[in-house]
Every structure is written in structure tokens, then in C-alpha cells.
Amino acid sequence: MELLLYKLSLFLILLATGGFIVYLIKQEKRVYKWSYRILLASFICHTIYFCHQYYTLGTAPVITLKSALSFFSWTIIGAYLIFHLKFRLMVLGSFITPLAAFLMIISSTIPGIDITVKPIFRSLWLTVHVGTIFTGNGIFAVTFISAIMYLIQERQIKKKRLGSFYSRLPSLETLDSINHYSLMYGFPFLTIGMISGSIYAQYALGSYWRWDPKEVWSLITWLFYAALLHERVAVGWRGKRAAVMSIIAFLILIFTFIGASLWLSDYHSFSSLEGRTGL
Amino acid sequence: MIRIVNIGMNHETAPVELRECLAKEPENTSLALASMRELPSIKEGMFLSTCNRVEALYTTENPNDARQSIVALMSRIGDISEHDFSSNLYTFEDMEAVKHIFRVASSLDSMAVGEPQILGQIKDAYFQATREKTSGVILNRLMHRAFHVAKRVRTETGISDAAISISYAAVELAKKIFHNLGGKRVLSIGAGEMAELAATHLMNNGVESITVANRTFDRAVQIAESFRGNPVSFEEIGSQLFEVDIVITSTASPGYVIKYDQVKGSLRKRRNRPLFFIDIAVPRDVEPRVNDLGNIYLYDIDDLKGVIEVNIAHRQQEAIKAERIVQEEVIKFERWLKTLEVVPTIISLKEKAEAIRQTELKRSLGSVNQLTPSQLEMIETLTRSITEKIINDPILVLKRKADRPSKDSYLDITRKLFDLDKDNS
């Protein structure tokens, strides 16, 4: 049942991504409508899958890299669906879904393992910590994608070569404001995620801060986003510079998410979380 | 047999002086329609007259007479001798005429292919024809199909997607930078026809205000009045750069009016809000390096021409798709027109059956009396359904054969089998 839901949401997201790409090329609204519906169906399957996992594991289902990646993908789609309500920007889906589908594909290639959930993970703080961090990550993925779209469009206009993307992409101002809003909404989640994480660490490990590489990298990511937000709001940064910065920030975030967990971290590493080593 | 004919002239076949003669008076169309209604050779007709074309579209059973009458009519309306314009006329008949009117409605025959006005003009011409009651079954159907084709071409091809004039191209670029032009401020420096045109387009797209600067302040005041904008002196341009979002330059100045350092200096005060320079002056008014600054976009006249060339090429590409749609719809219309030819036979078949039913009903009811109303009604329904069912299959066959070459022999056989021509002979 669980595997079926996972496979179904994987299949549907691939289908939706294909549809969104066809829409980008063909510009047929009908294709878009169906892709959107399929994506919604995939999201619902995925949601049920996570609810079921949460229920059976008794904790947020992000303990293995496999499920963490698929959860990341889920939050990206969730963030996209919410932003879609505000901006109604059809073409955004054509850029977001490939990223989410890519994460799902990687997730699906990692073999699933049976894990024993340590009692320490069955904590509300962990759920809050993981939930908010991932929500922030999902929203920042929208920031990242809108920045890429901005750079493509800005390049076309600056170089005066108005190619096929020119008519398909929205105006610079629209892309910049998506970038701005997603940054503004993502940041509080990241912040709450880090605070709740340190509270959980105090409760579970006995100290708020342990200079673990993942903690340090998270702090770097947070500082980067904080600086970007500050520059945007207080100094009036916008456009290309803000877009480039938000791309760099997201790359750091990805490194923190995957790199630091796989190779650097101690208790945050998946091998530790999965119960094979440590703690 | 009924023929659909289209006689007219357009921007390609006739010089503007000639088209003017025929199109100058707005009442000409109703005059033409009134005459067409009187002409015995014309069954249905409509008259289209725009600045780029003058055309008569009509149906007739007598093409030669009709043509002579229409040419004479044009000569009378334009007050020119037939000899002076007959070489400028084109004539399309039947499916060629259908194709022509579809192409005109979809703006494939326009001077600027894809321009949207023609559809409105052709709709007006048709509605005038319906008001004057000169249109009938065929023209009604034909024009509704023409509007349908135009709509298909507009939605299924990119024929009217991109701008093909400098000022429209500038407005489109502005929309790709700002999304919504509402609330945006424009500064227009210098006086040029094209700059005014661009300003007008921006105005129509909802910009908040237009400020005009000129070396001679009097001229600035004068231009500003036509846009209900504010005139400013040339010295104020620097401070205006902090405020505005779009700058149009078109001065005759030999050097740069707006320099790199000046724009760079304004960035911080603008809080990096995007600024779009439209430089339509030759020699250029804005230092080209300005384009290198973040959030500043500069298009000069050559850049805009480059954009338009790409768009024109794109339209030509899309026009091929549009021609295919037109062809498709012509075939559909032809099929419909052919079904029209079987309609008289179907009608006489139905009339004959109904006549027989009535006669027999009268005869039988005369010898039977004291029937209740419900029994009468039952007999009525019974006889009607019997006659209808008997002729139903022949009618279906006729409809099916309507667009086949064997249609004529089927019509002939039907008329003979049911003896439909007896009354007429």
C-alpha cells in the first residue's frame, strides 16, 4: 500500500512534468490544465503517503535520505501550488516540476531500508523542526526557480535577442516579485526550523548548539538568506543581483541538506539517523 | 445554379487615390447596399469599404449581368469611369471567393498581415448588410464562418502575437519589463512623430503620467498639452531620472543627451527600480553603455527594428499555418453549400407527402363521423408518423450524397420516383 502510493506519486509527477514541458513548448492551455490536474493528483497521493508514514513511524518521515528527498520534492510542489494561487503563472510549473521530479527520481533510485525508529525521534519538537525547515526549503526552491527564470528573461532583453523564451516567460517585474515574496515567506520558516531544532537538541542531546558541521552550514545558509532579505528590503536590491544571490543561497542550502548530511555531519547524518551508527 | 462572387480592389491592386474615391463617403456602403437590393441579378450582397480595400460580395444566378451591374455601381459611387478602374479589380468566384473572404477576415490579405482591425470592419459591413436586409441564407452562413475562421486563426496561430511597428514593439518590451504599465511614469525628451506615437501607445496601456522635456520650453508645453502631461525644462531631466520608469528620447541633438554617469548616479536614489530607455533618435540620445547597468534597459531604433524583423518573420511563418486553417474551412463550407442544393428536393418531397396525407385524411374523415377529439388526434399522429417514416430514408440518402458527384443522378431519380416535377410542369 505504501509502496504503491509512493510509486503512483512518482509516476504522476513524471507525467505532470512531461506535460508541463510539452506546455512550455507547445503553449497549449489544454495541456497545461491536464498537467496541473495530474500534478495535483500526485501531490494528494504523496500527502497520503506521508500521513501514513507519519502514523506508522510515529515521527516525521525524513529519517532516510530516500524519504527526505521525496519529502523535499513534496514541499516544493506544495509551495508551487500555494504560489500558483497568488500569481496564476502557468509557466512557473514548467520550471518547478522538473526540479521536484528530479528529486523524486533520485529518491526512487535509493534502495529502501527497514529502519528502527529510535524513541528519541518520537518527539513533537522533531516534527516541528523538520516540518518548518522543509517548508522553508520548498519555498526557497520557488525563489531559486524564479531567479533562474529571471536571469533567462533578463538576458534575452539585455542582449536584445528575443528568442522563444521571451514570449513564454512573464515580465521581469513578475518574476522579481515572486522571488521577493518567496524569500520573504520562506525565511521565517527557516528561522523557526532552526530555533525549534536547537530546542529539540537541548531536550534530546542536552545542549542547544554542538558545532556539528550541519549546524554550522545551516547557520551559514541562514545568514546568507538573512543578508539577501535585508538587502532586498532595506537597501532595495532587486533584479539580476538579487536573482544571482538567491541562486547561490539555494546551492548552499542544497549542500547543507545533502552534502553536510552525507559526508560531514555527525548526528545529523542519515547513517546515524537510520540507526546504523552513532548515538 | 447559385454563384458566390467577390469583386473588389485592395492595397495591392489599386493605388490609394483610387481607393479613396470609392471609400471617401461613409454613406457609400448603405448607398451600394440599397442599389444591390434593387438589382435583379443580385440575390444577396454586402459591401466592404475600408482604407485598404473596397469589395462587393454577392450571390447570383447570372454572373455576367451581376458583374456588369456591380462595376457600374462602383463607377457611380466613386464618380469615376469604368475604364479607369476596371484593370484594378479582382474577381473571385465560388470557392475562390469563399477563400478570399476567409483570408480577408483573418487578416491574411491585409497590408500588415495579422493586424486586428479588419475583423471589426468586416463585421460592421456584414451587420450593415443584415440591417439593410441584403444578406440571406448563404451570406449569413458565409460571414459567420468567416468570423469563426478569423477566431481560429487568432487563437491557433501566432499571427497577431508580436508587434510589427516600432512604437508597438516598444510598448511590448515595456510590458515584458514592468508587467503592468499602470502607475508607471514616462518622460519624453524631444519632439518626434514616432516618439509621440510611442507615448500615445503607452498612454493607451495605462501609464500614469507623461512628462515632456524639450530644448525649447514652448514646444514642451505644446506637446505636453496633447497628452495632458507636464512640461519640464531640459535642465530638469537629471532629477526626472529619479522618478520615471520609461524614457523616450527623440531629440535632434548631435551628442548624447543622457550619459552613463548620470544614469549610474541615479540608481541608488531610484532604489534600483527598473528604467527603460527607448531611444528613437538618430544620432542616438542615450549613451549605449547605459544598457550595461543593472536594471536599466536601453533599446535604440536599430534594436527595435531588429525586434520587428524577427516578429515579421514569425508572422510569415504563422501565416502558413493560417492558410491551412482557411483551406480546411473552405472545404467545410463547400460541403455545406452542396447540401443546400439537395434542400429544394427534400422540401418538395416533404410537401408532396404532406399533401397526400391531407387529401387522404380529408377523404376518410368525411365518411367516418362521431370521432372523439382524442381519436382524431390519434389518427393525426398516426398518419403523420407513417408519412414521415416513409420519406425519412430517401431524405437521409439525399443528404449523404449532397457532396458526392453522384448527387445529380440521385436528385433526378428522386424527383422521378416521387413525381415531384409534375406540379411545376
Image: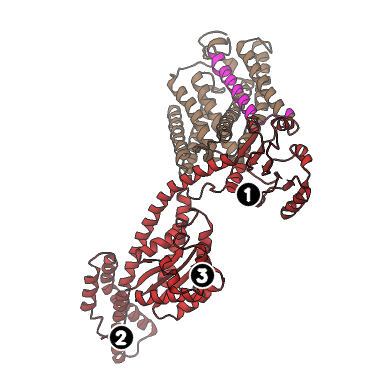
Residue shown at 38%/52% (left/top)? B324
Judge the density around disc 1: few (<14), some (14-19), many (≥20) Cα neighbours within 10 Å. Answer: some
- Mark 3 belongs to chain: B
Locate residue A272, reporting x and y percent: 54, 11
What's the residue type where badge 3 is placed? Answer: Leu
The answer to which of A6 and B316 lies nearer the viewer is: B316
Judge the density around disc 3: few (<14), some (14-19), many (≥20) Cα neighbours within 10 Å. Answer: many
Part of the protein shown in magenta: A235-262
Locate residue B60, reporting x and y percent: 37, 74
Contact flag, marks 1 and 2 (Cβ < 8 Å): no
Task: State the residue position of label 1.
Answer: B194
What's the residue type where badge 1 is placed? Answer: Met
Gap in angstroms between the C-alphas marked 1 and 2 = 80 Å
Locate residue B259, reporting x and y percent: 70, 33
- Marks 3 and 1 share the same chain: yes
Residue depth check, mark 2 versus mark 3: number of the one nearer the observer:
3
The answer to which of B147 and A185 lies nearer the viewer is: B147
Locate residue B97, reporting x and y percent: 38, 64
Task: State the residue position of label 3.
Answer: B22
B114 to A233, vertically: above or below: below
The disc at residue B361 is: 2
